[in-house]
Image (tube, coloured by chain):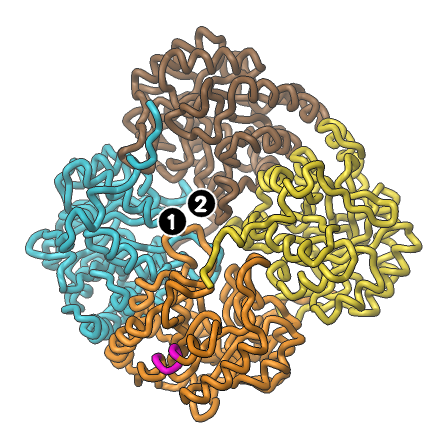
Chain colours: A brown, B yellow, C cyan, D orange
Amino acid sequence: MVFMPEEKKYRLAARAANPKGTVVKVKGLEIGSKKIVVMAGPCAVESEQQLLEAALAVKKAGASVLRASAFKPRTSPYGFQGLGEKGLKLIKKVSSEAGLVSETEPVDTRHVKLVSGYVDILRVGARNMTNFELLKEVGKSGKPVILKNGISSTAEEFLLAAEYILKEGNRNVILCYRGTKGFEPATRFALDISIVPWLKRETHLPVIVDPSHGSGNSGLVPQVSMAAIAAGSDGLMVEVHPKPERALSDSAQQLTPAQFSRLMLGLGPVAKSVGRVF
Amino acid sequence: MVFMPEEKKYRLAARAANPKGTVVKVKGLEIGSKKIVVMAGPCAVESEQQLLEAALAVKKAGASVLRASAFKPRTSPYGFQGLGEKGLKLIKKVSSEAGLVSETEPVDTRHVKLVSGYVDILRVGARNMTNFELLKEVGKSGKPVILKNGISSTAEEFLLAAEYILKEGNRNVILCYRGTKGFEPATRFALDISIVPWLKRETHLPVIVDPSHGSGNSGLVPQVSMAAIAAGSDGLMVEVHPKPERALSDSAQQLTPAQFSRLMLGLGPVAKSVGRVF
Amino acid sequence: MVFMPEEKKYRLAARAANPKGTVVKVKGLEIGSKKIVVMAGPCAVESEQQLLEAALAVKKAGASVLRASAFKPRTSPYGFQGLGEKGLKLIKKVSSEAGLVSETEPVDTRHVKLVSGYVDILRVGARNMTNFELLKEVGKSGKPVILKNGISSTAEEFLLAAEYILKEGNRNVILCYRGTKGFEPATRFALDISIVPWLKRETHLPVIVDPSHGSGNSGLVPQVSMAAIAAGSDGLMVEVHPKPERALSDSAQQLTPAQFSRLMLGLGPVAKSVGRVF
Amino acid sequence: MVFMPEEKKYRLAARAANPKGTVVKVKGLEIGSKKIVVMAGPCAVESEQQLLEAALAVKKAGASVLRASAFKPRTSPYGFQGLGEKGLKLIKKVSSEAGLVSETEPVDTRHVKLVSGYVDILRVGARNMTNFELLKEVGKSGKPVILKNGISSTAEEFLLAAEYILKEGNRNVILCYRGTKGFEPATRFALDISIVPWLKRETHLPVIVDPSHGSGNSGLVPQVSMAAIAAGSDGLMVEVHPKPERALSDSAQQLTPAQFSRLMLGLGPVAKSVGRVF
């Protein structure tokens, strides 16, 4: 068998496969339409009170989806690893109470069914973008999937990872660009803003941006969020925590509810200036 | 003598040195004020006709400064090296005819005086951000200076390069962020958008963005430009060529006059949405 | 609960946990002793004939371990994905016939038990270095583990990944350094040779180097292999294929049996020059 | 004029231009022959005593060239900038007393003639690899030139920089590979060892390696030096300071005379193991 490079390209993810663009629908919410969608919530579920406080705040400010992790992939085995199934139960309960669509991240193929029973949208985190068996499992799950780019993946590799999910028959894939690894100590990751219009041109899938991991710095999140919308992003995923300074992970980059509320007020005019609804 | 790390930080470039922010004034133009400033023109001066056509087009569309290089630092000694002093004369003549402020890049300490005689603003290109002798010379020139970041420089190193110029007594420094080198083949450089608000917070100097080198792709320049303004940039430097496909350098990233004109129309609403004048 | 950064460091992987250095023993073979260990074989099992030809050749030239993948994590879903369990059976059969210790890579937590039934050593590939659930499973497997560094992981993150395995009670971890992602097109990955002595100083675990993925170029593999040994590596993992030009993956970097044989002849003197046995 | 990409490649630097390889000769010393050449000395000239102590020590240990900088390009304008012409005089005096060939770095086109009057070999530092006017000046100087790669330059760009020097009629160019910028905090630069055999294959010019800047860590310099020789390097440039802990720059990476002496003892056997003379 001879290696055929042309076999390697994405097909189902290519813009040509759906030139008008894909709109992912979940519980009445549309992602990829003219309306900007904001997903917000804490990095990790820590307790019912913490999650509820965050959920009510982000709902009030205009978010549609509650983001929260129950399983935390951590660089060190001694870091906080998440609440697991207990966390999933809290996400289900709290998102329902707050009237928000829910999402979370399964970090293992064996968790996909379990997680699918609790949330509306599955998330594949940056560390798992090249966990191809996991991509296949979320592809088979029937659930919409938010796919984050790997921190050292090219934009083409990002679309090829989406292709793994699409190939399983799951067309509800949302790309979340969160920047890539660079040498700059001032920011956590390099959020190369040109990638947003490049993705919008190359693929029909909705594209959202994560300004929290991109900048790694709550003070920069508002400007980065506005830039993402101006660049053509269909939405945002923003980390919000009732008390960021006490968060068990990503302490420096989570917004307070008050900061998030101000951010949302600022986003409206920018969205309208580029022809979007907010 | 003992090495003292604390001596290494920037002082004159720090926000604290001028908390209200520096406005660079040149021929009645203000850079760093509420009004967005757009610099535009060809990568290199190729002929009087080419430069005049570009200058009249960018002036008509709303640009204030004519950008153009007479000396071209090129990776290969066999690449087009620029018109030299002949190019300087054309820049002076054409910018005057078009009613634009002029700028260009001296690439050697020995050119600084010569170039200063022809243009309003000196530019230090990315390849020369660590050419400290050149930084000192432009610092002594008495001319306003646009300083581009090196492609592998950190944001702190960028401010330390500005410090070299400021230390010579020249307070008219404009920072131009043009992205840094990464591994992504889809874009020419990684334009880490978080750097814009980071710079605005850390320094009092005006910050502009170069979306042309950042994306390396004329099709992405409009969205990247809007993102830059949304992120807080005080202006833009955009490459425009009457016939980009025939340009002697940077062919893929230069806009046509018509594309530039559309870009300028789109920028106004974004600028206003973040409280700027356009 | 307050986040405690000091909890994040590696302990079990630290040199202090076993100052004399760990020797991993498997079927009479010692990895981490004075003797250099060479693992070699094709990127992927393609057929019994291909694997046997490679195995006999590398055995004859002095290798001790047969490397071969049955599951192939591939960037594109349309790339060759490996022979799966059929491949595992071939690895078991052929390694036994050739008198070689066997190793291969499980790419999913659900495969660990299956794979453990067929081979002597489990390998965690670069794409899975941050698949923490997989790290835990191979930690519980009771099998020695070769852990490759992620292409964008720091050396500290590499040791923290090892810590995940060690923490499950599995002390038989072999680190395989295969370079990281950079911007250089001349080589496939940046094989930062300083990392080898850094690892040997920081950890007690055996360290081997993969010159095939590091350089991505069969013509450079011999020099890189010699450099790795001179830098203090305890061994090598080299890709060898009977007919590299017809390989289903990694065609450019696999050596022919003849090239591998010459490489092995050259390695002996270098190993001896730094006090090793070959 | 149409842009012609084929014009951009290196010609004079290509291996084909001198298939047998170039040997640079200076004061009876041959660089690029079978014999390994070691250049050593302090990062910067600080005083006559410091330089003489270093020079006598490295000469005694077997080095042939005294390395030392009189002009220091520093990231911060507040860092030690070197002794300037006073330093040049010390280099001339001390190298003569110690019986060593001398080299140093001019950091500006205007210094080239001055520096050429004091030393045997000119060095172009990493920060100036893309200072094309400086490359032209050292090309015209008639002096042998050590060209270090830029920290974010590709290997091809490195050879194109050499081409600038060769094109001026100066055939005595020695390439010094010192690694490139990466994300790894454990080492100062990524010394991608595959680049050494790649350069030896692509160009006829002598190639030496700088293990001091590459690793940034005196404890790693010996292993990296041995690896460089094993990989095919024609020599080394090593930083040695009588009292590294009191050095005005690069304190962490300079060897003591005793460490250097042990390094030299270790290098001989490695050099011989790959067929070189030491």
**Residue B43 seen:** yes
The residue that mark 2 highlights is A152
Badge 2 local density, few (<14 within 10 Å), some, or many (20+)? many
Give coordinates of residue B274: x percent, y percent: 71, 28
Residue reaching furthest to the top = A97
Per the picture, the main secondary structure of the magenta-coloured stretch is helix
Q: Quadrant of residue A87?
A: top left
Chain under numbered label 2: A
Residue at mark 1: C151
Element type at mark 1: loop
Q: Are marks 1 and 2 on the same chain?
A: no
Q: What secondary structure is marked by label 2? A: loop
Q: Relative to the observer, which residue lies in front, B221 or C40? A: B221
Q: Residue furthest front?
A: B1
User: Which is nearer the eye, A106 or D37?
Assistant: D37
Q: Which residues are magenta?
A: D53-57
Q: Quarter of the image holding residue D169? A: bottom right
Amino acid type at circle 2 is: Ser
Residue contact at pointers 1 and 2, CB within 8 angstroms:
yes
Image spot of residue B256 (x, y percent): 78, 48
Label 1 is found on which chain of the structure?
A: C
- Residue A232 as seen in the image, left or right of residue C86: right
Whether A160 is drawn above or below A235: the answer is: below
**Which residue occupies 26% across, 80% down?**
D268
Alpha carbons under labels 1 and 2: distance apart = 7 Å
In front: D179, or D242?
A: D242
Please state which amino acid type lies under the numbered disc 1.
Ile
Which quadrant: the N terminus of chain D?
A: bottom right
Give the x, y percent position of residue C115. Answer: 18, 41
In the rendering, at what x and y percent does residue B259 appear?
77, 43
